[in-house]
Amino acid sequence: MGFLDIDNVTKSYGAVEVLHRVDISVEEGEFLVLVGPSGCGKSTLLNMIAGLEGITSGEIKIKDRVMNGVHPSKRNIAMVFQSYALYPNMTVGQNITFGLEMHGTPKEERDKAMKEVAQLLQIEPLLTRKPGQLSGGQRQRVAMGRALVRNPDVFLFDEPLSNLDAKLRVDMRTEIKKLHQRLGTTIVYVTHDQIEAMTLSTRIAVMYNGYVQQLGTPKEIYDNPANLFVATFMGSPAMNVLPAKLEDRNGALHAVLTGADGQEIALRMENAPAAYQSYKGSEVMLGIRPEAITDPEGADRNARNIQGLTNGVTVTEPAGADTFVTMTLSGKDCIARMRADADVHAGQPFEFAVNMDKAVLFDPKTEERIG
Amino acid sequence: MAVASSDTAIRTSRMTRAFIYLFLLLFALFYLLPFGIMLVNSLKPLSEITGGNMIALPRDWTIEPWLSAWSTAQIGVEPTGLRPYFMNSLMMAIPAVLLSTVVGALNGYVLTKWRFRGDTIIFGMLLFSCFIPFQIVLIPMARILGILQIAGTTPGLILVHFVYGIGFTTLYFRNYYAAFPTELVRAAQIDGAGFFQIFWRIMLPSSGPIIAVSFIWQFTNIWNDFLFGASFASGDAAPMTVALNNLVNSSTGVREYNVHFAGAIMAAAPTLLVYIVAGRYFVRGLMAGSVKG
C-alpha cells in the first residue's frame, strides 16, 4: 500500500479505451513523472487523479481512501496547470487564497498562510498585482503558491514549464526540485520533455499509446530500457538503434554490423545474458547510447569491454561542451558524443571506441528488450 | 486589440489626406442631417414650420415643444404628455435586459463549461429562436399572457422581451465563453468553488465586453420594439414607441410638428445614450476571440 495507489485503472471514451490497466503505487514524498509523447494518456491519468475525469474501471486511492467519484475539492490535492490558470480578475493574493476561502478558512489564517507561501516563493512584492501584469516566470510561481498554500497530500503538475522560454525553464526546473527536497511533498508531474523527467523525478513512468511502457528510477529507465520505445524516447540525442547480426566467433558472441564502405564490423559482447544465445545467428537491434561511442582517449576508464571500430565520419557538430560525430553504420546514421577537443574530421576515417558494457539488444519484431 | 495606427495605414500625401477628411466630413454631415433637422424644428414655434422653411435655424428659440411633448401633449385621448410612457418603457426595458443577460450568461456558461449529452442540439434550438419572425408568435404569446393574467401590462411585456432575448444573449455568451480557458474552471473546481461560485466569481467578472454587447443589443431592440408593445400593452401600459405613434397620429386639433419632433428625439435618446456610454465595449466585445490579445 502506497501513499497514492493507482490500481488497474482504465479509461474509455465510449468504446475506445485510451488508458489500459495502469498500476502505479507512489510512496509518500516521491516525485513521480509521467512522460510520453502527445496523446499517450499521461494528462488523462493526471486528470483522473485530480478528479476532473471519471475512472472507467479500477481504483485510485490517496492515503488508502478510495477516490473514485470523490469531488476534486475533497481529495486534498492541488494542481498546477500548463496555462497556470490564474483567475484574471483577482489579485495575486486573492488567487492564492481563493481555495482557502472556498473551504471556509477564516480571514486571519488565510492571510497568514498567504504570507508564508509568498515568502517561500519570493513573490511578496507581487501580491497586490493582477496576473496580467506578471511575467511568465512570476505567473508560474503564483500558480505554485496557489497549490502550496493548501498544504495538500498530493501535488499534481500538468506540464507546468512548457510555456516558459528555454532559459527560464531550466531555472524553474531547479526551483521545483529544490522545493520538493525542502518540503518532501508527494508530486505527480506530467511532461513530454524527457530531460525534465530525468532531472526531477525519483521515479518515471514512460507512457505510450495508453500503456505504461516502463516504470522505474531515472537510472533504470536510461540504462535498462524495457523496449525500443523507451530506449529511443529517453535521452538526447536519442539512442542509436542499429540492425545487427548476432554471431558466435571464437566462442564469444559478436554483434556484426556493416561500415560506411561495406566493411564488416564485429563488436564482441561480454557477460552476455543467457537469453542472447537463442538469438544466435539471427537479426537483432543493437541499441547504444551516443555517449558510449567516443574517441579512444575519451572512453570511460571503468568500462570493462571497449571495442574498437574504424569507420568514415559523415558530419561533425561541435556543440561547445561536446562534439557530436555522425557516421553510417548498417545503413543508419549513428551519433557519437565526444570531448569537445577530440580530433575528428568529416570525410576521414576515424578510430571510435565503443563501450559495449552499455550496449543493449532488442528483438526486431516485438521491439522488446532481449535479456 | 488591433486598431489601425499610423504605421499600418497606407501612406498618403497631405493633399490626399485633406481630400479624404473632407469627403468623410461631408458624409458625416449627410448622416447627421435628419437628426439636425429634428433638433432644429423641435426648438421653434409651430408658425415657423408651417411658414415653410424647415431647414432654417429658429428665429425664436423655444423649449415649449419639449415641455409640451413631455407633460401636456394629447396622447390618444388623455393630455398626459409622453412622460408616463417613457417610464413604462424604462420599467419594461431595464428588467428585461437584465434578466435576458443573466440567463444568457448562465446558458453560455453551461453550454461551454458543463457540457452534457445533446448540448449542441439545445444550443441549435436556442439559436433558431433568433430567426423566428415576431409575427408568428403574436397569437400564441397573447394566449399565454392571458393565461398568466398579465396581458396588457408592463410585466407581460417584460416576459415577452425576456424570452425573446434569450436566444441572442445565449449566442453571445456561448461564443464568448467558448474562448474562455476551461483550465480556469477546473482550477476553481479543485479550489472548491461550486457551480454558481465559479459563475459569479470567475466567469462574470471577466465578461465585461460581452455584457456590454448584450446590454446594448437588448436595450436597443426592446426600447425600439413597436409590434409587441402595440399588441400586448395598450392604453396606460403602452411603451414609448406606441405612445409616440399615438402622439403623432392624434386626429384632433392642429398637427404640432415641433412637438412631434421633440417627442421623437425623446424616444430615441435612451438608445443613443446607451450606445455612447457602452459603445466602445460593443466593438471590443464583438471582436473578442477573433483576434488574440
Image (tube, coloured by chain):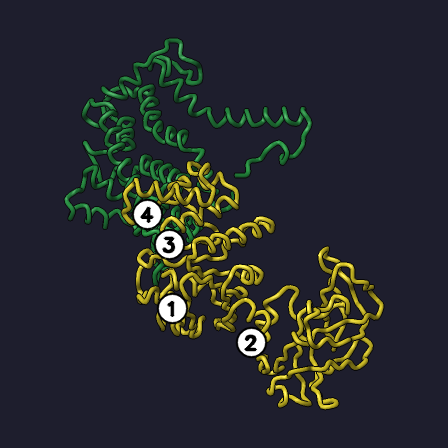
Quarter containing the C terminus of chain A? bottom right
Please give left or right for residue B217 compared with residue A205 in the image.
left
Image coordinates of residue A32 in percent, x first then y, are: 47, 63
Could you tell me which chain the residue with mark 1 belongs to? Answer: A
Chain letter for mark 3, please.
B
Q: Amino acid at mark 1?
A: Gly
Q: Amino acid at mark 4?
A: Leu
Q: Is residue A111 left or right of residue A126?
A: left
- Classify mark 2: residues with Cα within 10 Å, few (<14), some (14-19) or many (20+): many
Q: First in sequence: mark 4 or mark 1? A: 1
Q: Secondary structure at mark 3?
A: helix
Asked if disc 4 and disc 1 are in contact, CB closer than 8 Å, the reply is: no
- Is the residue A180 above or below the residue B252 in the image? below
At a point 32% along the width and 55% down the height, the residue shown is: A73
In which quarter of the view is residue B73 placed?
top left
Q: Which chain is green?
A: B
Find residue A209 and report its horizontal and vertical position in percent.
Answer: 51, 71
Q: CA distance from mark 2 to mark 3?
A: 41 Å
From the viewer's side, name the closer residue of A300 and A107.
A300
Residue holding disc 2: A226
Q: Is residue B18 above or below residue A307?
A: above
The N terminus of chain A - image quarter: bottom left
Q: In the current view of this chain or complex, which residue is farthest to the top?
A: B60
- Disc 1 target residue: A2
Q: Which residue is mark 3?
A: B113
Camera-side mark, 2 or 3: 2
* Earlier-in-chain disc, 2 versus 4: 4
| Of the two numbered discs 1 and 2 in the rendering, the one whose residue sits closer to the viewer | 1
The amino acid marked with disc number 2 is: Ala
Residue at 28 percent of width and 46 percent of height: A105
Q: In the rendered structure, the residue with mark 2 lies on which chain?
A: A
